[in-house]
Each structure stands twice: as C-alpha cells, then as structure tokens.
Amino acid sequence: MALIALSPVGMAQTGQPAMQPNRISGQIKQAESMPKTSANDTKAVVKSTSMIQNPLLQPFETPHGTAPFPLIKNEHYLPAIKEGMTEGRREIDAIVSNPAKPTFENTIVALERTGDLLGRAVSVMFNLNSSETSPELQGVVREASPLLTEYGNDITLNDKLFARIKTVYDQRASLKLDPESAMLLEKTYKRFSRNGANLNAKQKEQLRAIDKEMSQLSLQFGENVLNETNEYEMLITDVKELASLPDFALEAAKATAKQKGKEGYLFTLQAPSYGPFMQYADNRALREKLFLAYNGRGFHGDKNDNSAIIKKMVNLRYERANLLGYKTHADFVLEESMAGSKDKVQSFLNELVGYAKPAAEKQLAELNGYAKAHGFAGDRVAQWDYSYYSEKLKKEKYALDDETLKPYFKLENVLDGVFMVANKLYGLTFKENKSIPVYNAEVRPYEVFDRDGKFVAVFYGDYFPRPGKRSGAWMNDVQGQKIVNGVNIRPHIVNVCNFSKPTETKPSLLNFNEVVTLFHEFGHALHGMLANGQYESLSGTSVPRDFVELPSQVMENWCYDPEALRLFARHYQTNEVIPNELVEKIRTSQNFMAGMANLRQLRFGLTDMYWHSQKPTNESITEVESRIDSLVQLLPPVKGVAFSPSFSHIFAGGYSAGYYSYKWSEVLDADAFEAFKEKGGLGSREVADKFRANVLEKGGSEKPMELYKKFRGREPSPKAMLRRSGLIL
C-alpha cells in the first residue's frame, strides 16, 4: 500500500494516556488459504530461514505468514527499510512514467498497492518499539524515522504523481465507482492536497523540515516517558508501613524486589504497582511521594524532561497548519473528523462540563465528608488522597472493592470470557497456536475462525508490564487486511496491556478497571480482525479518531452485563460463579464518582484543544494546565507536577486535537449498546450482525455517520450516554 502514517489505537478512560510513535502500516501478500504449518514443520522452517541473512527481505514462511520475530534482529531493520524504500520508489516511478492516461486503476489503485516490502519491516519495528524495545532498537528507530519521513514526503510532494491523482479526481463524477472506491479516490486526493501537494518548492522544503523534526521529537517524547517510568523505584523494607495493603499488592511488590535483587517491597510507576498503592496505602506521606513521582514524569528539568519538546511540537504543528492554509493544527485535524470543526468540539466539551461538574461537586463533597468522618484532618482531600478515600467510600456504600472482586477475574478466565462474548455475538472462535512465532514468551498467539470455520485473523495477546514495554494499553496490527486479485489477505492483530503479573502464590488477578481495559482493547482488535474491505488504507481501524473508539467502548458495556459476567467471572480457587449480589453491586456502582471521572477525561480533552486550537502562547505548561484546571479540576492544585509532559496520546501518538474523541465515542457507544439491550443483549444476533456488517467490517470505506445510520437506523442520541453516566434521569 502507499505510505500512510498511522498510530496504534489506544485505551479510553480506564487507563493512562500512553500512545506510541507513528508507524507505517504494511503487510505481506499471504492468503488465508495458505497451508497450515505444524510445530515440527515450523522448526524446520526456522532452521532453514535462520540461514537467510535478513528475514525481513524474504517471504515469511510461517503459519499464516506471521512475522518470524525470533529471527529478526535489530541490525535487520535499516537494510530492509532502505531496500523497501528503493522498491517503493521504483513502484512510484512506474506509476508516474506510465504513458497511458491516468485512470483509477493505473494511478489510485496502483499507488494503494505500493510499499509492501517497506511496510512489512516498519510494521514489525514500530510494534516492537512499543512493546519490546531496548536502547539499541530505540537507536535504530531514531535513525530510521527521518528516513521514513523523507520517503513519505517524497511521495506526497511528488508533482507528477499528484498531477495524475488530480486528473482522476477531477473526473470522479463520471467514473461510476463503487462507494469504497470513491472513498479511496477522495482520501488519496486529500492525503496529498492536505499534506503539501499544492505548495510551491520553497514551502515544500519547509514542510519536509517540519515533518522531520516533529517525527524525531515525538520519538524522544515517548522515550523520555518510558525512561521516567522505568527508572523510578520506591523500596520499602519495613512491612509495617504497608500493613494496609492487600496481599496481592504486597506479593507483587515483593516479587518485583526479588526480581531486581533487592530485599523488601519494591513499588514502581507501572500501573499494576502504582494503582493499588494509591488505593490502599494508609501511609499518606508515601502516597504523596509516589503521586509526585508519577505525575511529575517528564517534568523534572533533567534529561527526560519533555517541557521544551511540548512547546516545540505545538509551535511546529501550528506552523505546519499555517503552511497548509489552516488557521490552527486543530482546524487541520478536525476537517476530516466526524465533529468537523474545533468550534463544534469545544462546544461539545463545554456542554459535557456543564452536566458533569455539578455531579462531581456533589460527589467530592460526599467524599470530603467521608474522609473527615474517618480521621482526615484537612478540609479537602488532596490529589494523592482521592483514590484512597474513594476506594474506602465505595466499599462502605456498596460493600465492594477490588480486593473483593479480583479473585473472580483471573486473567485466563477473563480472556475466555471476551472470546465467548465474541463467539456469541459474531460467531468467532479463538484457538491458541504456539507454532506462531512471538516476540516475547509472555505473548499468546491465537488463530481466529468464523462460525463457518473460515480463517479470520491472527491475534496476539501481550498482557504484562516489562521494562521494554510502554505503559498503558493499545491495539496494533502487524499485518493489515486487503483484497488483492480476489484473495482476501487477513490481518494480524496485537493487543498490548500492562496487567498485574502472577505471583508465587496467585495467578494474574485483574481489578475491575483492568477487566474493562481488556474488553476495551479487544473491541479495537475486533475492528481490526473483522475488517473486510478492498483497500488496506480504508480497512479496520483506518477511520476518523472520533469514530475509532466506538467498537472498543461498545465492548466495555459487556463488563457490566450480568449474562456476560456469569460467562467468565469465576473464583480462581473454587471455580464458583460470581454471586448475583456482586453482579448487582458492580452494576449499581457503575456510576460511582462518575462526575469526577467525566471531568478527568474532559480535562484531558480541553487541554489538548487548548494546545492545538489557537496560536501558541508564551504560557508555561503550568499556566496552561492551571487555566484548564480552573474549569474542571475540583481537587487542590499540586506544585511541581503536570500531566502534559507524559500525555503520550497527543505528543507521541496520533490523538493531537483528537483526545475529545473518547467522549464523542461515548455518545455513539451508549446509543449503540441500547440497540443490543433492546433486542436481548448477548442473544441479539440481529443487532450483532448489523454492527459487524456496517461498522466492524467496513472500516473507513464510507463516512462514519452514514455507517452508524445504517447500523442504528438514525443518528445517535447523546441522552443515552448522559443517562448511563447518571448525569440525567
């Protein structure tokens, strides 16, 4: 396919912002009918392939053409990327020099089919740079990134290529294309016109320089956050200071210390360590210490400080937008979104603040009152007190907390559960196949089959934190989906999360937020796995940011559904199905502190829009965040911390001027899920089939609102989301 910059698809309010650097999506031409390979055959393949100098330059002779991760070394990437770029330039030259007049097939489709060799190498590299990186791999990516940026600009700024594209585009009314092909033509033209094709030579050089610098800054931002996360350790040797922590948190901390050759209990900034400590630790001074470390990532004035990078990226994005004829970066981004304009996004966010803030104020007043009644000395809880007292209040109100629920959410059971939900709704089955190569022994590879036994996709599950893995959770593809010469090339999809690891005495037991996260990312995976389009650049999650979260957030709803919960929520020791009273408590507590949770997400969205919807100011990061916090932050401000320097979604990923999309998609998903409820929940085969056919399979082949209306029969109503959040009756 032609060169297109994409980002892994990230998680919603259940996790921390942690997106990854842009990558180039590509795939190899492996058909779903490719013969299966047995474990013994795979050993022979691996042995013979090991003699090949660079596996990235050879066909992947593995089950379903999956990436032979164990054979790929860091030194293979740059030669493969350079060879891929050479091949890609030959392919572009062939299009440009074609003496035949430009047509949809010889120009638009031909361009779409370029870049397979390069895409293969880059897809593997950027996937591993997110989930299994090292200083050596980071060095390779830093060297490759400007080369890839330059290569991409060589294509989009190619005058002769754009002239052919424009010729076809100008004839679009008479071409009688099917809707998907018409969308490909429109997207191809806009990809060029919106990225400098109409600029003069001097302006094109300016654009090249901006893009090259931004790609390097984005990589550095992500590396700095990863370094800050990995480098911090809080070692506690006196277990008396940890008396309030549940056994699972103590065991995990002890195992972490042992793994690093230390005595005691080691706490880190990884979510499975940080979250439980902030929820359960009675020692307020230690909570404050850990809070400051986590929320000060990238903001310490040292080698990992991201402050200057933020200011530079915001200015470069503004300069780039101006160069392309847009007032701001947000104007550029939102032109191709469902929302359509920054004014509509701002109005949307402000309206939600109006609903959420009164509810949040009442909830926080209740929390402050509870804290005072239980020994808190101040007038208002601090930010490092919020999770601690919220957990206690939740337990008192609903007799429910993570410690009560975790035994029912063994990771393997939750995985079985999400697979069963996918089976009931869409007829999918998942079969683990250990002959599929993986990049880490913890990764679980599956073959996915449809209800008729037809191969659908390869699915990789990667669930535990490691030093080489970025924080948060996301979905990627290693191979995208497309149809070439009648052959449906099926996708290879990855879910990456950071859940609590097994200990010496217990399996991996998820808290409820982690359960929701797993379902969320699996929703993205379904969007990728069920893709069924002609063109990869329109396939799967290649949709506007404010539509991409719909499938993931629809899946979250099943975590609160009694029928779905009883499929997989079983006590890890007794195999007892989760009791009805606990299911009911999960449902009734769904809106606990919902106003505060909504304000948190709105805080992220408003800050993103402030950075990107106006001319950059000379305000400091603290001043910008204080401005937004005056509108939505009800907890007392804390000096020396800021969240923008670790806000990887917008500074190291693809969500700049797009973080609002999580709330936007909530409107869609709440309305969509009401359709499932209206027709019988998990048994609503008719609704599931419509959702699959009109959303999951269609990707970006049509306008998002048209796809949604084909599914729902009408445009979405925001009232469903407001009702679900308890913000209206």
Image: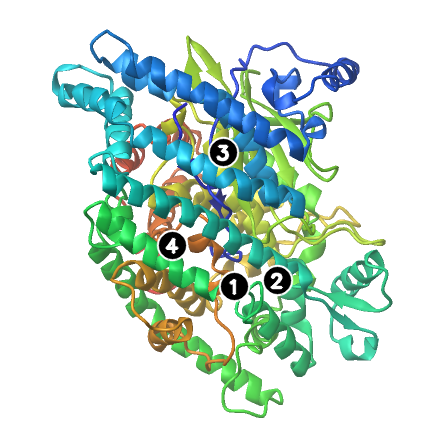
In the image, taking residue 57 as reference, residue 243 lies left or right, namely: right
| Point 69% across, 24% down: residue | 436
Which kind of residue does numbered mark 4 sit on? Tyr
Image vertical order of residue 234 relative to residue 56, above or below = below
Q: Which mark is residue 526?
A: 3
User: Which quadrant is the C terminus positioned in?
Assistant: bottom left
Say which element carries label 4: loop
Circle 2: is it few (<14), some (14-19), or many (20+) Cα within 10 Å? many
Image vertical order of residue 248 relative to residue 93, above or below = below
Judging by the rendered image, the residue that carries numbered circle 4 is: 659
Judging by the rendered image, the residue that carries numbered circle 1 is: 589
**Quick one: label 4 or label 1, which is nearer the N terminus?**
1
Say which element carries label 1: loop
User: Which quadrant is the N terminus positioned in?
Assistant: top left
Say which element carries label 3: helix
- Per the model, the C-alpha gap separating discs 4 and 1 is 26 Å
**Quick one: label 1 or label 2, which is nearer the N terminus?**
2
Please name which of the two marks, 4 or 2, marks the residue nearer to the observer. Answer: 2
